[in-house]
Structures are given as structure tokens and as C-alpha cells.
């Protein structure tokens, strides 16, 4: 493809994208295709000869869009939001054109240095302690990871490396395998599935501890568990959330994957009280801060534990400036990395802190609007406190009725929700996800839920 | 940012990108900046108010390009190629606009299904055994990973899970930790640093075995090592490359990160002889097949070992169609994933197999051209057989002279190379990296190397 054709193609795609996003509200949020729908729509093999770009463009609606779940539709309330913005899309174009692999400083100084500075910008926007920032001149700093799962795993491996190092100082005769078999980490039973997985991947024990009635892991619970494990000869080394870590010299990792974006608004920072005690902190701008996936921000007070754990340094990756700037390949699992800080730079400048705050507050206000609508109907209850842009609700009554309600809502195809469960209570989750969502969309989603409940309860009455 | 502004911005960026790429040859390949160059060029904090996109556009040359190492310059011969093409850039725009997180089938059926079919297209282009392809109707199939490092780790974790499962069948009384401490994997001493790292991450022993004089790991060497370890009570479970795996029921992973792209040309498939014995096979279209980073293709004959190792299945990620199509979140380390198969689809269609083959053959021809130039100068020697687009060469004589030569070449700033070392022999590597490289560029690079050698040797004479 020549430059001339690229220009025509990219400009046609630009128009298509604007058209797609601006009219997203009118598309069916979840497609009605069945597994295997796509294969018959495309040839069995790649074409031998080049096709014109217009042929590809013509296939997008037919092949792709017919099977897309529209995560950015104001009718999409499943999972959590994932970010999408015009500045991030344009930044990724530039990232794709430069297409450097920034594994070391010399491999593209701009790629490393913009990331260092953007992580400082972002850290300041959240009010992170200076110890986490590169600008402090200490050893701390931030790095962009692919996902919070990766960040969790990276922090866990850093904790593991520190624990092994410290245990060896006390017991020089113990082998790595012996120490490894004694390491134990802790997380809230309500923690995300990625934590359990990080334990599996890292090959260490992770204990899920029972939270209090506000789904919070209490200091006493953690302390008891740690003391019990110490008594049994184990080595506590990693906590996903908690407050008694300093006492026992345990690595504290805070994962605020979704909520972290809200900390750019000072009124929500009470939620990160105690952050100064953490060893690592992570949140996903690619969830709620309008920076397209993937952009997961991880800060470390002592990155050296990660660097030491991962350091494999062959000659072909060495360079003269080692030590003067971070070589980010030691801060992550893969070797390769894209120029992702461009997305942060474009989004932060083209929105400005003020508009980003407005965006977060708007989503939280809309969650409260939905909560109010829900509470105004005596058939419904809200099962957890609404703190951010997520409302957990259900029909008063048994789980089966709520399972039937969800099936009916999703079956009608107008909006999309997923369920969750805490302590055997099944409920529905409404997340405010789209950049295009306005109050009226929340009213429409509520009407749709109410109509589904009307239908369901009327049928139940008839059958009773 | 409104749609109208986005259109102006994206179109201006399109023109900028075409201008950048088409005139890349004229830019200095490695920037002359020093560590810390970027921080003074940008404000200390993110702006409070939104800036216009023209302000960002105006900063690209000043802040970013002044510190970019141009991986796509025909003067860039370091590391390995990384892919960059117009169709891939446009595909990523669409991926950014859809911005779905395809962790399960229902989360965006098109995202999963296009990936399944594109991995079949690609597998057929390489002539992979049908057992690896989803179209065979068996359990095998392909998945796009971020990097070969991730693919190596994923395969290692699958191997670990299979080995633990099988050992437990024979020894139901052994604990996981006990089994884990006995597991041992094998790789060639010359294998990529990511292999050593996967062992570190996966928490298992990996033995580096000495290759023969062609840098190849021999079957006998592997067999001896396995038999020795078995005698010592260890459990061989994973080999990075080899041929005696079937005999000992050891997982064989083949990593053809760079070379794999060349297998689309039948004349290079002799290099993957024995692939039918492998359990997993990986290569990076994002290296040499014009699909922008990240796109690492991994095929598995029995993905269930990975799925079992990773399966953490909370209610909010379950859906009605489970089992009917792959839920790719179980095939990888992170939970989130972008719509990356669009890049493959666009590149394969807009180039066609024919042009991609022509591209690979062109790079290999240029490597041989450089080899010929090198051999025509009696001061130089080529240290390894030239098989793909990489030439390993040196000045006859000691390592110090070659280190000085590399410093001089890179110091002159016209071209960029990195060194490597095998068995204490230090040499320079010239990789043909850019989509824009033509024969004349190879002549220019050679002249530059020769001129550097002339200078160096003349100085040495003067000082002697």
C-alpha cells in the first residue's frame, strides 16, 4: 500500500469511526449472532493477490460489526467501563507509525522519557505520595503495564523476590524452593479473579480472607491470619489490601483498577487513605480515564525488587546509558512494549484535568440517579452502597427471580447487564460505561429494567 | 473533543504519518539526546484546561521526534525488525474505535471469531500441521499473544500444569510443591533471554544445554540431560527446542519469533522440520510480517492445559455460550485483550500472500548482498551462516577492535547496529529491518561500516 492510498484509506476510516461512535446509541448493544457466525462470511484462506482497501472497508459492517458487542453504547452496562476517546485513537496512530519497541532507553529515548514524565503528571493528578514519583529524585517511579492483572503479577513477583532475599539474609542455609514453599500472600475474599490467578502464576500460596459486612478486609483479620501463619512456620510476603503490613514487613499492593481514576477528584481521595503505607499502587486509565486499552498505571516505591527479579541482561540489549534512565524491560513481564505514553499525553492535554474531573463526576452522578430510580420502586433494592459509577441492585426476593429478570433484560436486547454474587446473594450490576451516556439514557435503561420486571412478575402471577 | 475536531486532527495526523514514513531515510537514525532530555521540554503538571489539538500537533517534532530512535529507517540495523505498515495502522484505528475487551465470546463475538479464523489463515500460510488449527475440528487452535515472551511463559505454564497433573496420577501422595521442586525444563544455551526469564517467572528450573558448533541443540545432548535428571529424581517437563520429547512425554515448545514469518515461503519450511512433534508453536507477525506490535501468534495442540492452569471463572464473566467458542481469557495471562485480529485481516488482504512472500525474500536477498560485500573485503569475516535477514560479522582479530568499530559506527550516527557474543567471540549484527530498505541502502550501510573500519585501522596504525 502506497502513501497515497493510505491517506485515502485512513481518512475514510476516520469518517467511518466518527459516524460509528456518534450514532452508537442506535445500534443493538449485543449482537444476535450464534457461535461460529463469522467463518462462513470470509474465505477459507488468505488471498493470494492484494485486494483494494475499498473491499476491506466494504466488509466491516457485514463481517465485523454484525458480531460486535458495543462497549461504548450508552446501553452497555456490563462489566466495567473501558476507555475510548478521540485523542487516544489519534495518539495510537502516531504510536503505530513510530512503532518503536521501547525496551531500553536507547531503543527510543522519547518512549521511555515521556512515560516517566506522564506517570509523574498522572501521579500528581491523583495526589500520590512523592515517594512514588520519579520527580522526587528517589528510586520510586511509575510504569505503564498492559493490564491490572499484569500489574498484580509484577507486584507479587517483586514481593516474592524481596521476601526471598530477606529470608536468605536470616537463614543463609535455606534453599529458594524451601523458602518459596513457606511464602504466603493475603487478599480479600472479594478481590478480583486476577489476584487468585497471579498466585497461581507466581506459584505461591494466597489466602483469601473473609471481609467484614462492608466487604472490607479488616486489619484484625489480616493480623490474626499473619500471626497464625508465622506460628506455623510460613512467611507472610504479600498483601493485596490491608493496613498491618508495615508491622510485619509485608509488601502491600493496592489495586484500584477502576476506582483509581476517581482520585483525580479530591473528594474521592478519602478512599485511598493509607496509601503512604503501600509498596505499589495500580489503576487503569484504560478503564475510566478516556485512555484506550492498554494503559494500566503502576507505581512502585522500590522498583529495584522487580528489576532484580526480572533482570536478564544479554549483550545485545546493553547500552552506554544504563542506569541514567529506567530500562523499562526490567519493570514488566514481556520484553517488547509500545509507545503508550503518547495516549496519556494526548488525553491529558486535549481534555485537561478539569474536563476529566467533570467526566468522572458525571458518571457518578448518573449512578446515583439510577440508584434513586431504583429505590423509588418498592419492588427493588440496592444491595451495596453506591460509591462510584456502579449500582448493584435486585428485585426483592429469591435469586431465581433475579436470574430470570437478567435473562429477560438481556433477551430483549435493548440494554446489556451482567450479574454478580456475594455470599449467595445474586444481584444485577449496572455500570455507567459510555462516554456518550447522559441522564436520559439512564432513564431509558431504568424503564427497560422496569418493563422487564413488569413482564416477569405478571407472568409469575399468571402461573401462580 | 468533538467529532468534527477529531476528523480534522486524525486527517492531519494521517498526512503527518505519511510524510514521516516516506521521508524516514533522511532522519538521523538514533537521536543525539542525553538521558533526561525530555522533562524540561514539557510542563511539570498536566494542564488544568483543555488545549487545542494543534498545540499537541506542534509539539510532536520538538518533544517526541527529537528523541525517537527510528526503527523503520533503512539505516536501522539493530536488534530485529519490528513490523509497521499502513494497513495495520488503519486497522488499529478501527480497533481503537470499537475498543471492546474480548475476554470472552459474548464480550464481542467478532473479536474472538475473527481471531480464530485469522489464526487459521496464518497457520495455513505457514503450512502448520492441521492439529494446530481450529478448522480441523479438533481441540487445537491459535491465539494472539502480546509477545513471544508471553507465549513462552504461557506454554511453560501449560507444560507445568500437564506435568503436575500426570505426576499426581502416578504419585497421588505427592504435594504440588514437592512436584514443582522436581520439575526441570531445557533450552539451548543460545536461546533468547526471555526463556531464562520465563523459568524465573514460572518458578521452575530451566537447564541451558550446550549447543553444537552450529548453535543447535542436539537430540543426544538433550537425551543425556533428561536421563541424568530422571536418575536424580527430577521430572523433565518442558523443552524449548529439541527432538526427543515424545520419548519422554515432555512438552515441546517451538519459538520461531523472527524466523516464523519466513515459513510463508515454502523454500524456508525445511527450518521447521519436525514441527509435527511440537505441543506449541509461536512466531511474531509483529516482527517481520508487517503487522504492527503487538501480535504474537501462538498455536496449541491441546489448549486445555493452559485453560486448566488459568481457569478462574467468576460469575460476572460467565455466559450462556461457554464451550461453543474459545473464551480467550483462559488462553493468556491478562484478562483484557484488544481486537488485534483486525490487523492481521487488513494486512493479509491488502498485501496478499504473494506480496508478503516477496517482502520476506527481498529482505533475505539483501542480507546476502551485505554478506557478499562483507566477504569481498579481506579484513572482515562473517561469523554465522546467513539464513534469514540477519548478518553476523566482524573484523578479523580481537574483540576490542570490534568493540571500537561498533562504537565508531554508532558514534558517526549514520546507521545503527548492536553487538552480540557467542563463546567469547564478540561480533556485530546487521539486521535488515525496514520496509523501505532497498539494495542501495545496503550499499550505503556497507560503505559506512567500511569507512569506520578505515578510520579505526588507520588510527591504530598511527598509534602503533
Image (tube, coloured by chain):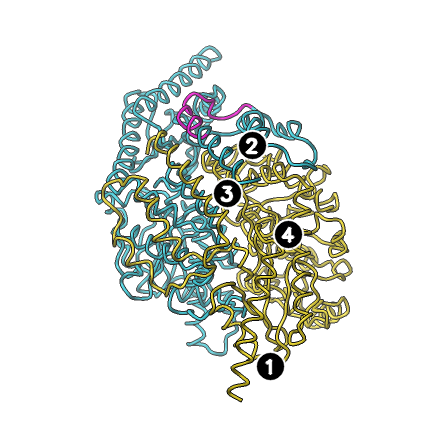
Chain colours: A yellow, B cyan
Give the residue pinned by disc 1: A398
Give the residue pinned by disc 3: A337
Sequence-earlier tag: 3 or 4: 4
- Distance between the alpha carbons at the discs numbered 3 and 2: 13 Å
Where does residue B314 sit, x and y in percent of width and height? 54, 69
- Residues at discs 3 and 4 both on one chain: yes
- B391 vs A265, left or right, is left
Image height of A323 relative to A446, above or below: above
Determine if the magenta segment contains residue B67: no
Image height of B135 relative to A320, above or below: below
Residue drawn where x is 68% and y is 72% of the image? A210
Give the secondary structure at mark 3.
loop
Q: Residues within 10 Å of mark 2 (few under 14, many from 20)?
A: many
Determine if the magenta segment contains residue B23: yes
Give the residue pinned by disc 4: A282
Q: Are marks 4 and 1 in contact (CB under 8 Å)?
A: no
The magenta-colored residue range is: B17-32
Amino acid at each position: 500500500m502506497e502513501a497515497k492510498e493510505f491517506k485515502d484509506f485512513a481518512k475514510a476510516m476516520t469518517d467511518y469511526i466518527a459516524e460509528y461512535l456518534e450514532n452508537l446509541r442506535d445500534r443493538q448493544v449485543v449482537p444476535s449472532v450464534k457461535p461460529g457466525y463469522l467463518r462462513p462470511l470470509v474465505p477459507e484462506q488468505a488471498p493470494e493477490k492484494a485486494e483494494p482497501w475499498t473491499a476491506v472497508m466494504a466488509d466491516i459492517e457485514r463481517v465485523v460489526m454484525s458480531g460486535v458487542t458495543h462497549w461504548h453504547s450508552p446501553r452497555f452496562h456490563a462489566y466495567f467501563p473501558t476507555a475510548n476517546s478521540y485523542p487516544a485513537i489519534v495518539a495510537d496512530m502516531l504510536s503505530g507509525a513510530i512503532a518503536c519497541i521501547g525496551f531500553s532507553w536507547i531503543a527510543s529515548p522519547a518512549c521511555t522519557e515521556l512515560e516517566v514524565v506522564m506517570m509523574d503528571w498522572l501521579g500528581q493528578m491523583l495526589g500520590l505520595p512523592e515517594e512514588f514519583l520519579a520527580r522526587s529524585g528517589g528510586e520510586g517511579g511509575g510504569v505503564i503495564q498492559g493490564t491490572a492483572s499484569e500489574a498484580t503479577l509484577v507486584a507479587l513477583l517483586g514481593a516474592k523476590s524481596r521476601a526471598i532475599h530477606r529470608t536468605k539474609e536470616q537463614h543463609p542455609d535455606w534453599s529458594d524452593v524451601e523458602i518459596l514453599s513457606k511464602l504466603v500472600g493475603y487478599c480479600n475474599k472479594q478481590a478480583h479473579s486476577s489476584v487468585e490467578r497471579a498466585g497461581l502464576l507466581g506459584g505461591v500460596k494466597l489466602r483469601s480472607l473473609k471481609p467484614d459486612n462492608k466487604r472490607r478486609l479488616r486489619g484484625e483479620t489480616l493480623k490474626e491470619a499473619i500471626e497464625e501463619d508465622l506460628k506455623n512456620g510460613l512467611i507472610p510476603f504479600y498483601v493485596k489490601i490491608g493496613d498491618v503490613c508495615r508491622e510485619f514487613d509485608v509488601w502491600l499492593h493496592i489495586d484500584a483498577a477502576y476506582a483509581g481514576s476517581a482520585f483525580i477528584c479530591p473528594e474521592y481521595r478519602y478512599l485511598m487513605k493509607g496509601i503512604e503505607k503501600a509498596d505499589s499502587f495500580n489503576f487503569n486509565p484504560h478503564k475510566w480515564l478516556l485512555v484506550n486499552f492498554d494503559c494500566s498505571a503502576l507505581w512502585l516505591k522500590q522498583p529495584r525488587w522487580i528489576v532484580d527479579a526480572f533482570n536478564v541482561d544479554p549483550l545485545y540489549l546493553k547500552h552506554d546509558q544504563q542506569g541514567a534512565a529506567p530500562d523499562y524491560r526490567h519493570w514488566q513481564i514481556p520484553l517488547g512494549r509500545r509507545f503508550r505514553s503518547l495516549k496519556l499525553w494526548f488525553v491529558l492535554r486535549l481534555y485537561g484535568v478539569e474536563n476529566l474531573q467533570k467526566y468522572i463526576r458525571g458518571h457518578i452522578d448518573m449512578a446515583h440517579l439510577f440508584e434513586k430510580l431504583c429505590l423509588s420502586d418498592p419492588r427493588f433494592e440496592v444491595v451495596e452502597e453506591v460509591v462510584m459509577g456502579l449500582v448493584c441492585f435486585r428485585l426483592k426476593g429469591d435469586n431465581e427471580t433475579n436470574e430470570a429478570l437478567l435473562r429477560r433484560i438481556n433477551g430483549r436486547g435493548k440494554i446489556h447487564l451482567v450479574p454478580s454474587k456475594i455470599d449467595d446473594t445474586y444481584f444485577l450490576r449496572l455500570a455507567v460505561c459510555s462516554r456518550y451516556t447522559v441522564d436520559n439514557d439512564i432513564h431509558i435503561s431504568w424503564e427497560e429494567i422496569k418493563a422487564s420486571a413488569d413482564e416477569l412478575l405478571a407472568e409469575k402471577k399468571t402461573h401462580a
